[in-house]
Amino acid sequence: MLSPRWKKLWRDLSAARGRMVMMVIAIAVSIFGVGTILSAYTILMREISRNYLGTSPASAFIELNQVDDALVQAVRQQPGIADAEATSRVMGRVEVKPNEWMPMLLFVIPDFNAMRLSTFTSESGDWPPPEQTILLERAALPLTNVAVGDALTVQTPNGTKQSIRISGLAHDPGLAPAWQEQTIYAYITPATLAWLGEGSTLHILKVSVKEQNPSVGAIESTVSRLSAWLTGQGYAVGEIRIPPPGLHPHQSQMNSILMTLLVFSLMALVLSAILTATMIGGLLAQQVRQIGIMKAIGARSSQVTGMYLALVAVLGLAAVALGIPAGNAAKRVPAASTPGSENYAGWIIPCCWRFATPSAAQDACS
Amino acid sequence: MIRQIQAHFHGSDEVLPVRESRLIELNSVTKAYTIGSGQFLALKGIDMRVDVGEFVAVVGKSGSGKSTLINMITGIDSPTSGEVLVASTPVHALNQEQLAVWRGKNVGIVFQFFQLLPTLTVAENIVLPMDFCNMYLARERRQRAIALLEKVGIAEQADKLPADLSGGQQQRAAIARALANDPPLLVADEPTGNLDSQTSDAVMQLFSNLAAEGKTVVMVTHERDLSRFFTRSILLADGLIVNGQAVSHA
Ligand SMILES: Nc1ncnc2c1ncn2[C@@H]1O[C@H](COP(=O)(O)OP(=O)(O)OP(=O)(O)O)[C@@H](O)[C@H]1O
Ligand SMILES: [Mg+2]
């Protein structure tokens, strides 16, 4: 049987049931928040980085008057260069609604089955895309208001309007999602490029450097040596683009968002701690008289302290018992429902985050 | 004049023999409260003795220091200077933890406003001091509580909450609680202050019986017509005893 002091505590607790439940929920929710954000953070950091590095991102993109197979072969032999590949980017436009156009970035891939740098994968449909068809980046499809297999009206700078069929979808972890950039990403072969009216010449040389985890400076010096060599070979070197090495295009943006979320959930935890302190303070204030009586009839300070500490411990444990399994459940559900860990984040990260940084969420999910 | 009397009693203190039957002894007890910038002397040098089995009334005007005085005896408050000995224990020298243990076993306190814990039944309220002081076997405590309730005449109220009892019944329950650990000393601060005269007579009779059984009772009271119950009265005025030592058992 419970001794009277624990009975007293229990009855006081039940008397203030409503407030106590509120308090426990407040703490549980903030524990849940912090736990979820922390694990989302860990997963996102790991997955995004892994996905991105899995694409063998190029160290630099060098714009030239023309890039052919022989040049690519020769560049691979240049000092400090690990690999090279030809590509092209063409900015065109696509009709998404009658008379409503959106920019379309076309990536020209000479050989879809032998991509070496900044690679992407087939999501569905044909691979490689047959001539006079395009692959869309999967996040771009919803913006076009059509389905795979349907045709889109596309125009490139030097071409006329062409109706082109979507033959499939690709998944490119190195890109920002279409709906954030408001740009449709598509992939075509050089033959399709020629058919669109742009000629089949490729203009961009993608290179990667030999050095592991290179700094921007190291890449710059290797690439400028290469650039000098290219000029010497009679090529006209245009813009050279060096993306932050090893970093997903939205990594830093995502880092700051996650930090913000973490700070918010920590603030929620602090707030619930303050709420708890206030409520316990209120409870104790109501009990000052009773504490006085208990001490007058022989209760030692340690006994009284023990009672109220036990009360706080019970509330705290209840909150933890609620918050931690909830956090774990949140982690388990998406793992079970979507094979592969990539889609964790889309489920875990609350909608507000998606709105705040659609690209980051999309990247995480893609 | 008061100072002269005080000086007189003070002078005679040294020659009083320490008696076997002495329970309480206060020597030159003062109590100063800090109020605002200055100090206020609530007790200005109290010398007082109480023997076993006495039923002592502490009387005096409001603000004369009655509550302050008995708080010295129970150790609820500590004197600024002087000695408080209860059953030879130097109460003034105990720390808070020692005081709690000592008080729980040696002093039963009864307050004006009964002060039963509202969420415990009457019986549980009486078991509480036994629980805190770890007195009696756990399984015998309730039985003892019921026996004490029988003694104060409200055994049938044992399982009710205090709020369901009348004022007189609550005060009887509070007396039963004061007796829980069988202390030699009962201290009460205006225990009848909130009761009608008939009920207060009954409560006084209860205290009187306890004194007759050998408990020592020190009680603060305002009510003059209760004097027939006491073996002695101590009159306080402005923090000094103005009579009372005269009725000594010397
Ligand atoms: N904590 C305190 N701080 C400052 N002054 C105090 C404190 N407690 C008591 N006093 C003062 O000490 C004096 C004696 O107070 P005490 O409570 O002992 O009076 P009392 O004789 O019990 O009065 P009453 O009959 O009204 O209960 C009063 O003037 C009171 O204002
Ligand atoms: Mg008083």
Image (cartoon, coloured by chain):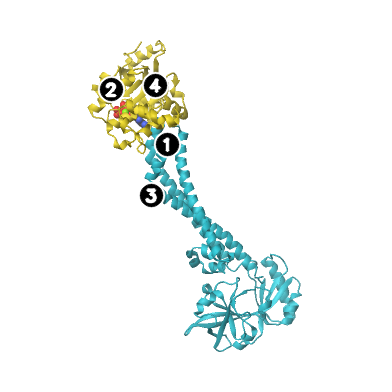
Chain colours: A cyan, B yellow
Whether residue A235 is situated above or below residue A327 in the rendered picture:
below
Q: Which residue is mark 2?
A: B205
Nearest to the observer: residue A167 or residue A50:
A167
Q: Quadrant of residue B236?
A: top left
Dot 3, how many residues are within 10 Å of its Cα: few (below 14), some (14-19), or many (20+)? few
Q: Quadrant of the C terminus of chain A?
A: bottom right
Helix, strand or loop at label 3? It is helix
Residue kind at label 4, given as amino acid type: Pro
Q: Which residue is mark 4?
A: B184
Do marks 4 and 1 share a chain? no
Q: Which residue is mark 1?
A: A5
Where does residue A163 sit, x and y in percent of width and height? 54, 87
Nearest to the observer: residue B227 or residue B7:
B227
Give the number of the disc on residue A18.
3
Instruction: Please tell me which residue is depicted at 25% across the width and 28% down the height of the picture.
Output: B199
Q: Does the CB distance between marks 3 and 2 fall below 8 Å?
A: no
User: What is the spatial separation of the Cα atoms under label 3 and label 2, in whole angstroms?
Assistant: 45 Å
Helix, strand or loop at label 1? It is helix
Residue kind at label 1, given as amino acid type: Arg
Q: Quadrant of residue B65?
A: top left
Q: Does the CB distance between marks 1 and 3 fall below 8 Å?
A: no
Give the number of the disc on residue A101.
none
Helix, strand or loop at label 2? It is helix
Q: Does the CB distance between marks 2 and 4 fall below 8 Å?
A: no
Residue kind at label 3, given as amino acid type: Gly
Do marks 4 and 3 share a chain? no
User: What is the spatial separation of the Cα atoms under label 2 and label 4, in whole angstroms?
Assistant: 18 Å
